[in-house]
Image (cartoon, rainbow, N blue to C red):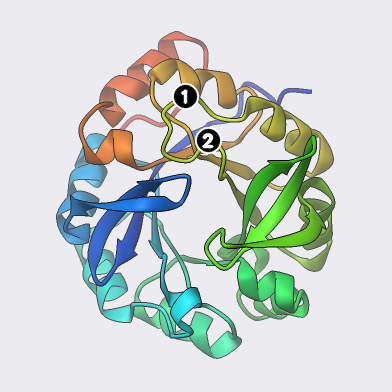
Amino acid sequence: MTRPIGLVRRIIPCMDVDADIVVKGVNFEGLRVMGDPVDLASRYEEEGADELFLLDITATVQGRSTFLKTVRNVAAAVSIPLGVGGGIRSIGDADAAFKAGADKVSVNTAAVKDPSIVAKLSKEYGAQSVVVAIDVKRINDAWRVFIMGGRHETPLNAIDWARMVEELGAGELLVTSIDADGTRAGYDVELYRRLSEAVNIPVIASGGAGDPRHFLEVLKYADAALAASVFHMGTISILTLKSYLSESGIRVRTY
């Protein structure tokens, strides 16, 4: 089942940050420096991005809190919604991110370890502000949930976990295919088709964008498409991408 084609789809650049620098890898490994988060965020807003995601990719692994200085600087530079993730393990962590300028917070490892955090955040801030990120890898023809920046496999099935966090109060899912991440070979369209059938909350597709056609394919099912390196390196212009999608029958916002 496709999502209603009349709904406006969103294009979301993602900035993975390590030590206040935007980086990008392949399959969550081999990180390369991409640039300054404030400079990139400002450029993406000018190009017509609908939202931005800022993910601290080492906070969870290093056991520290989210990079609040970077969040503040990026939030001050843009007016479009900003999602923040990485190292958010409590109401206190989320509160600090919101006070720094985040519009949404994303939880991943913390939600798997203690699912009640999703319900607590939703009750405190509203479902619209709570994103559950799910990192997924195919294991024996099933989509398995991974945590700790993709380092640790869990017993969770991604489709079942998506349903569970929706019931707990998540307002949105940010689902990344580890297999496709950074490969530019296309999104795992089958994964997002299954998810669109399983849940009623918006699904953001992440991992694998390399060509405008990939966005067109996945946005038949997902509510938004997130990408990183193709935007960071100028391979795809958001303005050009939106024109292509609009001409292909996908509704997008123009600014």
Quadrant of the rendering where the C terminus is positioned: top left
Q: Is residue 33 above or below residue 6?
A: below
Mark number for residue 180? 2
Q: Position of residue 139 (x, y in %)?
A: 74, 43
Between residues 55 and 139, which one lies in front from this camera angle? Answer: 139
Marks 2/1: CA–CA distance: 7 Å
Q: Answer whether residue 26 is visible to the viewer in this image.
A: yes
Amino acid marked by disc 1: Ala
Give, as a three-letter code, the residue at label 2: Ala
User: Neighbour class for label 2 at 10 Å: few (<14), some, many (≥20)?
Assistant: many
- The image shows residue 81, relative to residue 215, as above or below, that is below
Residue 137 position within the rendered picture, expressed as x and y whole percent measured from the top left = 66, 45
Q: Residue furthest bottom?
A: 92
- Quadrant containing the N terminus is top right
- For residue 185, which numbered disc appears in the image? 1
Of the two numbered discs 2 and 1 on the same chain, state the one appearing first in sequence: 2
Q: Which mark is residue 243?
A: none
Task: Mark 2 and mark 1 in contact? Answer it, CB < 8 Å.
Answer: yes
* Quarter holding residue 171: bottom right
Q: Residue at x 39, y 82 (%)?
A: 99
Q: Nearer the viewer, residue 184 or 79?
A: 184
* Count of numbered circles on the image: 2
